[in-house]
Amino acid sequence: MGVEMNEEAVLEVGLDVPTAADMRALGLRLGGLLRAGDLLVLTGDLGAGKTTLTQGIGEGLRVRGPITSPTFVIARVHPALAGGPALVHVDAYRLGGFAELDDLDLDASAEDSVTIVEWGEGLAEGLADARLEVIISRSEGPSEARTVKIIGIGGRWAGLATALK
């Protein structure tokens, strides 16, 4: 899951998310808790809800939209509309490794932005000392239901569990 032995998980929350609207609402709640410098690494199969979650986070951060999957452009910056941090939304699916992610120069804007990296497991963990790893699993069958596991690495995330439930 991307958690290395020398890193401390200070937060682990599992949530059932019944619908896409609920996924977006979770993102909205999460967006209200984020601040400049935060890194989120999103993991899940195609169609799991990574971009839907990011749309809610963007709404919570009050950034310029629309937020769509950056699969073909690799990264998009959504400026803040209300004086908060910008949202840097990255899709690492097409990247061949950390060197290509590093070429995006994300660390130049990381302190001033919230950075979300879809498909970033095993690539993006080195972008910040603290991060949220969000693992989204789909239910079997035609249901929209998802299970979301949020793991906070680093002291920044201690005590956040109650705000997410």
Image (cartoon, rainbow, N blue to C red):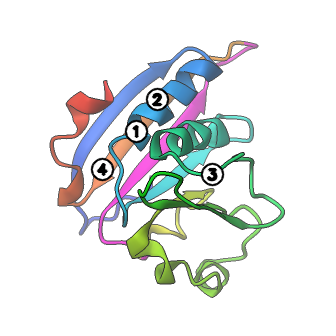
State the CA–CA distance, disc 1 to disc 3.
Answer: 17 Å
Disc 3 and disc 4 in contact, CB within 8 angstroms: no
Question: Residue 103: which quarter of the image?
Answer: bottom right
The circle on residue 30 is 1
**Image x and y of residue 143, in percent:** 69, 12
Distance from the alpha carbon under mark 1 to that under mark 2: 6 Å
Identify whether 148 is placed above or below 109: above
Q: Which residue is depicted at the point 84% across and 62% down?
A: 72
Which of labels 2 and 3 is toward the front?
Answer: 3
Q: Which residue is mark 2?
A: 26
Q: Residue at x 34, y 56 (%)?
A: 35
Q: Please give the name of the residue rendered at 72% of the width and 45% of the height, measured from the top-left corner.
A: 66
3D distance between C-alphas at marks 2 and 3: 19 Å
Q: Circle 3 — which element?
A: loop
Q: Which residues are magenta?
A: 127-142
Element type where label 1 sits in the image:
helix
Q: Amino acid at mark 1?
A: Leu
